[in-house]
Each structure stands twice: as C-alpha cells, then as structure tokens.
Image (cartoon, rainbow, N blue to C red):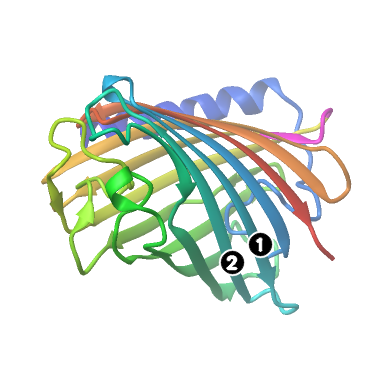
Amino acid sequence: MKYFLLTFLMISTTNELLLAQIRAQPSSEFDASDPATMKSRMTTDLETYFFVANARFYALRLGYEYGLQNGKHLLGISLPLVHNIYVADFGGYENTTGVGDIKMRYMFVPWQETGNASFQRVSTYFEMTAPTGESGLGRGTGTWVYKPGVVFTFRPNPFVSFYPEIKYSFSTKVANGLGGDGAPDQTNPALDGLIKNLSFVVPAVAIVTDWRGWVGMNATYIQSFSEDTYYVFLRIDFGKMIGEKTSAAINISKFIAGQPRLDALVQAKLQFFIN
C-alpha cells in the first residue's frame, strides 16, 4: 500500500507541474479523454503486452459503444484478435493467433450534477467477458469473468479532471492464470485458480490547448485475493482530436511494484464518435 500512496503523491505533484507549464482549454464536446463518456462511438485498440521472461501478447480489439439519448445508459461490446509469443514450452503452441475473450459492458449514470460543482458524476458499470478465446493457448481465461465497478468524475475547473475508479473482477470457475489476464503463468503454466481481484485506479487528465489534446497520468493498484499478492502500475496517456469526431491516443503502462508478471503495456486507441 505504501507504494500506491507514493505513486498517488507523485501523480499529484506531476499534475501540478503540468498545469503550471501548459495552457489548457475545456474538453471537446465529445470529451474523448473521459473514461466514462456516454457518447456512442466505434473503437479500435491495438495493445502490446510485455510479460516477464520475454513473453509477448498482442491484441487488436474492435468495439462499439452505444449511448442512449438521455446520457444515462451505455451498451458496449468488443471483439479481440490475439497473437501470443511465449519463450516457455507450451507443447508447440508458443506462437498462435486467434479470437480472444469477447467483452460486453453496460454503464449506468445514477447521479449527475448539471451545475458547476467539482463533483460531477457517478458512473456504475458491469463488464463481463465470455470464454470465446482458447485458454490452453493463452488467448482467454477459459471461464466467464465478471467486473462490476464505479467511476467518480471530479472536475475542479474546466481544464483538469480526475476519474477515480473502483473495480472488482471475479470468476465462479477456475481461470487460466491466477492473474486473470488470460496469459499462462510464466513460473507455473499449469496453475489455475479463481479470479478475485480488487482494483483502485486514480487517473488525472489535463487538456492541452494548441493541439486539441490531453495529457494524463494514472496509478493502478490491484489486490489479488486468490494469490494474496498485489500489483502497482503507473500509466501515462497522450491523446488528440484528429477530426471533429475522431480521437487518437497512446497509453503506456509500466509495472513498478508487487509481483513481477506483466512488465509493460502499450496501447494505441482510435475512437470515432457517432451523432
């Protein structure tokens, strides 16, 4: 926990430095930097996972998010295509390509402030992944995984936003890999167990004027109850509106404390918003 508190203090200090050095403007009407935006959009995510022992995991995720007109409800689905490269011996299946676990999501906004208050919104959601990926080849967990969570939106001024998030991931059957990320455990590929992870996420986002973009920093603490261990990640985001309805972003996550398993994650995200 001390690493998480240290990371949070570092993010707060860095955010103050960003505000002192860049000019900011209110976010775009689509607010592409908002992780809890309720706007309809199509998404394309390219992800590269670097695990310990030089294993790598690539994914292309195609998704669609449909927001209802009142801004209270959002339905989403994404289909991943996955390619794995492992250095361990998995019986000839070290390098495979195929469909991963399909993710479905429902988000609901039970409370929203329409005035100028700093605390603006509470967004609850429920995600679940279907075991459509081949777990024996590391492309899926091999079971249904459920992820209820809540996101709080704080906007102290039009230029800076905070989106603290709490999420619990769990499965009712054993999953491939105790970490629950769908990749075999590097130290013991045959070891399976239930997924029971509690996550705390603290993102801070500042909007940059000149290039219609944003800079964000994100600290994530994950407590795994099945393994009785924890993970701490630090992420930095860069995003930009490249059209009236299109945004592009790159996110870089680095493991900094806890059990060393996933070393780094690089994500490129493209969103096209629909009226």
Q: Is residue 11 above or below residue 40?
A: above
Assess whether mark 1 and mark 2 are in contact (beta carbons under 8 angstroms). Answer: yes
At mark 2, the secondary structure is strand
Position of residue 197 measured from the top left corner of the image (x, y, whole percent) = 25, 54
Q: Which residues are magenta?
A: 210-214
Position of residue 61 measured from the top left corner of the image (x, y, whole percent) = 57, 48
Q: Amino acid at mark 2?
A: Gly
Most distant residue in the right direction: 244
Residue that numbered label 1 is attached to: 64
Residue in the image at 51% along x and 25% along y: 14
Where does the N terminus fall, quadrant-wise? top left
In terms of depth relative to the viewer, which is nearer, 40 or 162?
40
Q: Is residue 99 inside the magenta stretch? A: no
Image quadrant where residue 234 sits: top left
Q: Is residue 263 above or below residue 275?
A: above
Q: CA distance from mark 2 to mark 1?
A: 6 Å
